[in-house]
Amino acid sequence: MLSDFSGHLEYIDNLAKNTLIAYTGDCSEFIRYFEQKRSDGFKFGSVSVAEARLYLIDLRKKGLKQVSIARKLDSLKRFGDFLTDSGKWKNNPFRDLPYPKMEHYRARYLSAEEAFGMLSFEFAGDFAGKRDRAMLDLFYGCGLRLSELVGIDTNDIRFGERVIRILGKGSKYRVVPLGPKSAEVLKSYLEERTLKMQSGNFSIKAGRAVFLNIRGNRLTPRSVGRIVKKYLLMASEQNGLSTHSLRHSFATHLLEAGANLRAVQQMLGHSSLKTTQKYAHTTTGRLIAVYKRAHPRSEKV
C-alpha cells in the first residue's frame, strides 16, 4: 500500500527524495494512529470525514505547529486521492478539510556583521578546517539549502564561469553565482582534498562528492547541520539558528542591498515569487526608516 503510494509520488509526481520520505512517513503515522485507536484497526474505505478531522485535532493537541499540520494534511490528501483513484476508498475524507491558518512566518537570520564575523573566524588550516570554512561560505554566499550543499559534486563547480550547478527541489537544476572570495575558499579546500587523497591515508569512497567526512564518505545532512551549528553559536547569541538561517541571511542581505526580488527568487530556486517575498520584511522596514529620515513630508506618515 505505502510502497505503491511511494512509487506513485516518485514516478508520477516527481517529488524530491526528502519530500517523498516526509509524505510517506506522514501516512504511516496516520495508519498507526487508527490501528491504535480502533478495535478494527485501519481499514480501506472506513475512515469518515469526522474521524479525519479528529486526527488533525489530535495533532494540534500534541503541540504540532500549523505548518507541520498543513504538511501532514497535504500528504493525506494525496494519499486519499491515490487510494480513491485505485478503487480502495470510495471517497477521500481529507479532500474537503481546510488547511490550518498559517502563523506569521519570521525567518531567523544573521546580521551582516554577524555573518562577516563568522566567515572571519580563524579556521584550522587542516582538511576539516578548510572544509568547514568552504561550507559556511557556500551556505551564506550562494543561499543553499542543506540538501543542496550536501549533494554538490566536483563536476558541478565551474571556476572559469564562477558558477555552481545546484540540484534543488523537484530534481530541478539551477545555476548560482560563485563570488570571488567563495571561489577562493572553495578552491583551497578542494586542493586540500586532493592532497589528502594523494597522501595514501585517505580514500574517497563517495566518488565526486565535494564535502567529505574524515573517512572519505559524503557528509550527511545531520553531520553538516551539527558542524554549522557550532559556528553559528560562536557567531550570534540568537537561539534557534540553523543552516537555513544562512540561506535566510543570504536573501535578506541581498534585498537590503537593493537586489531585484525576481533575481533573488531565481538564485534561491523558489518556484513562486510569494515564497521569496517573506524575506522582504526587513527591506520594508528599512525603506520606511529611510523615508522618515529623508523625506520632507515624512513627519505626516
Image (cartoon, grey):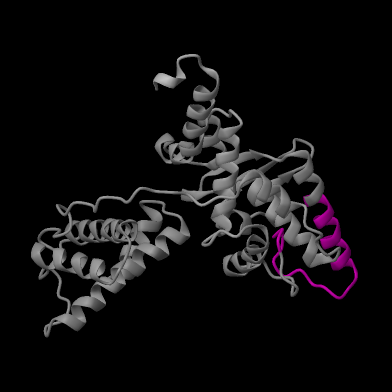
* Residue drawn at the location 25% of the way across and 78% of the way down: 32
Which span is picked out in magenta? Answer: 186-211
In the image, is residue 157 above or below residue 150?
above
Picture quadrant of residue 36:
bottom left
Quarter of the figure that contains the C terminus? top left
Residue 60, visible in the rendered structure: yes
Q: How many labels, in total?
A: 0
Name the residue nearer the viewer: 253 or 154.
253
| Residue 39 placement, left or right of 16 | left
Rendered location of residue 20, percent (x, y): 40, 61
Rendered location of residue 80, percent (x, y): 21, 60
Rendered location of residue 118, percent (x, y): 71, 54
Rendered location of residue 43, percent (x, y): 14, 75
Judge whether residue 21 is colored magenta.
no
Name the residue nearer the viewer: 224 or 122.
122
Name the residue nearer the viewer: 98 or 80.
98
* Residue drawn at the location 64% of the way across and 51% of the way down: 139
* Residue drawn at the location 69% of the way across and 66% of the way down: 206
